[in-house]
Amino acid sequence: MSEAERPASPGATLSPTTAAGSLSADVQALMRKGNIADALALLQSRLQDAPEDGEALYFAAVCARMSQSFGAAQGYLDTLLHLEPGNGRGLQEQAHLYRDTRQFDRAIDAYGEALRANPALLASYRQRLALLRDAGREQEANVTAAQLQKVEALPKPLLAVTDLIAQGRILKAEQLCRQFLMQAPSHTEGMRLLADIGSRLGALEEANFLLETACELDPDNVALRIDFIRVLSKRQRFEASLEQAERLLRTAPQNLQFQSLRAIELLQLGRYEEAIAGFNGILEQLPGDAITLTSKGHALKTLGDSGSAIGAYETASKASLGGGEAWYALANLKTYQFDDGQLENMQAQLAANPPLGDRIYLAFALGKAFEDRSNFERSFENYALGNDLKRASLNYQSAGFEREVDAQCEGFTRALAERQGNRGCEAPDPIFIVGMPRAGSTLLEQILATHSQIDGTRELPNILSLAQRLRRQRNSADETPGYPGILADMPADELQKLGQEFIEETRIHRGDAPFFIDKMPNNFRHIGLIKLILPRARIIDARREPMACCFSNFKQLFAEGQEFSYDLADLGHYYRQYERLMSHWDTVLPGSVHRLQHEALLDDFEGELRRLLDFLELPFEERCLRFYETDRPVRTPSSEQVRQPLFRDAVEQWQNYSPWLTPLRAALEATGE
């Protein structure tokens, strides 16, 4: 059996039977003996009982292909990749099938997609390299050869770590990587992989330290430097990330990737005109490049130049590769409507089975296109497809979030709040807007940022990062995570230090106003922590009717995070857990949170605004009623909507989809009080 034909253990979610390894062991033993038909019969028997067993589907596809039953092999792969669209070995097997049926161009692309899903697949590098050379595509072949050489040079433990990361087995990958680094503490690729794991787990400070150290050890390593830039950017250390991007660019001023990195960091820093100039410079060399055009569109949209943003997005959507994000960016403007030709174009692109990322973007964009035509059944079909594809690539478990809420309710008590209260940093500057995404937080920020004493910023990651840092600390007595229990005995000087750290780290986002807004909605999970380190901080809970709020999340493809939002049942469960935790904060921290119901704001704008400003102890300013006239960058999906007066159009939109929302309705009812 050649390497290309030898099946490796797929990155699939195994049922209890196959997880024990008995099925795969039996199948592989038969395949080694050449008994492919017997192996396939065993797999077919298994699939009769468990038709969604990912491992069985994978091996069945391999056996069918090796038997030259190509139609059956494709059927198994279609089922597997529908269930697990990011399964690297499934994508590799799809490429093998294209190769064996002499669809060589499709095989080249499919091997590339498999490697994006799992960079540890040596067979995909080798097969893609051979096909590229046969096709005379020497430049691409040379790039693939260099990538293969780098991966082949990895120590076996690090190749295994790379594979585990791709399979989503992050904790196992972390354990193996740490074991390797204990033996080779200065191995920069090991440090890079551990930093990648840390970044995925939210341990951004540790990732920052690892990459900074690795860059000092190997200053010319481009991959290290790029990862370092990305982690600094995730931490919103944009001055530092720009400095690193410019350092990289100085090594190769004509390198378009380095130019793009610099332009993106300028964009993050709010230097929009310079960022746009950088994107324009790249487009002079690569006219029509979809990624650059889309990034330029994002910059223009943030500035409020929607006309120019639309032009950039529309041009990007016409690209033969990578246009999916541009289609979704147009849909995400909320105010844009697709014409019939664009609708047909998107449907044709989706039917052509593009890479996973483009399929997700196109499905969400088509959901919006059909919604605008009041074809709600077709709209829901596409929204559901986009959500299914996205959720299959994630690891979200609703039970895990419920345990997190349990831990906060059990660990952060009224007694703890009274004992540890008023010991943190006394700065009154922060105003936190928390709650569910798509509950009106961007609108609230826009209204408040119009006030002369308040700066609007963005969704700041600092509190989430701090909570993750505390969670990864260990109590001396045992190996259980220390957060939130660690807060009970935290010394006053430590609370003050953490609060002051937040004030200093967020200063870069502020202007000269005495108060500023952090509108990260997920901070509702850490209100106890916020009030201990910043006892004078003000907290606003942006609340929206459950069905409307949850369905608005279901229609939204988020840039990152919000992993609960891609399944209707998960959404209903999350919403009720959010309510439960907010009720807990009301009990243990009475009077600390001002709740503002979105529908009430629409009914009595001025009255609700006056009550909100009273809570913030700020004077009423008439201009807050004309928030839509405020000229400030807005980065969230609601950027176009908050530049208009208040409207009620979205309040009951979910009812158009009521026939298909039974799982959401059931989850809200099952977990409600």
Image: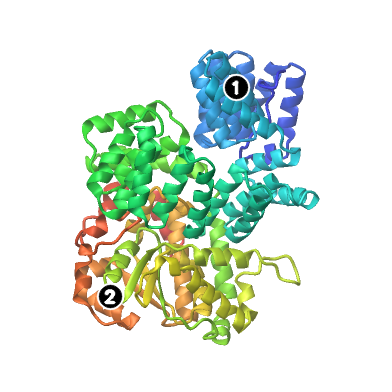
Amino acid type, label 2? Ser
Going by the image, does 651 lie left or right of 403? left
What separation in Å lies between label 1 and label 2 (alpha carbons)?
Answer: 60 Å
Amino acid type, label 1? Leu
Q: Residue at x 59, y 43 (%)?
A: 223
Q: Residue at x 50, y 65 (%)?
A: 462
> Residue 79: percent from the left, percent from the top?
52, 30
Q: Under tag 1, what secondary structure? A: helix
Going by the image, does 653 lie left or right of 581? left
- Total numbered circles: 2
User: Which residue is outermost to the right?
Assistant: 183
Please rate how many residues cluster around mark 1, counting C-alpha atoms within 10 Å: few if below 14, some from 14 to 19, many from 20.
many
> Residue 535: percent from the left, percent from the top?
48, 81
Residue 322, compared with residue 267, is above or below; it is above
> Residue 548: percent from the left, percent from the top?
32, 57
Instruction: Give the label on residue 129, or none.
Output: 1
Instruction: Give the label on residue 193, or none.
Output: none
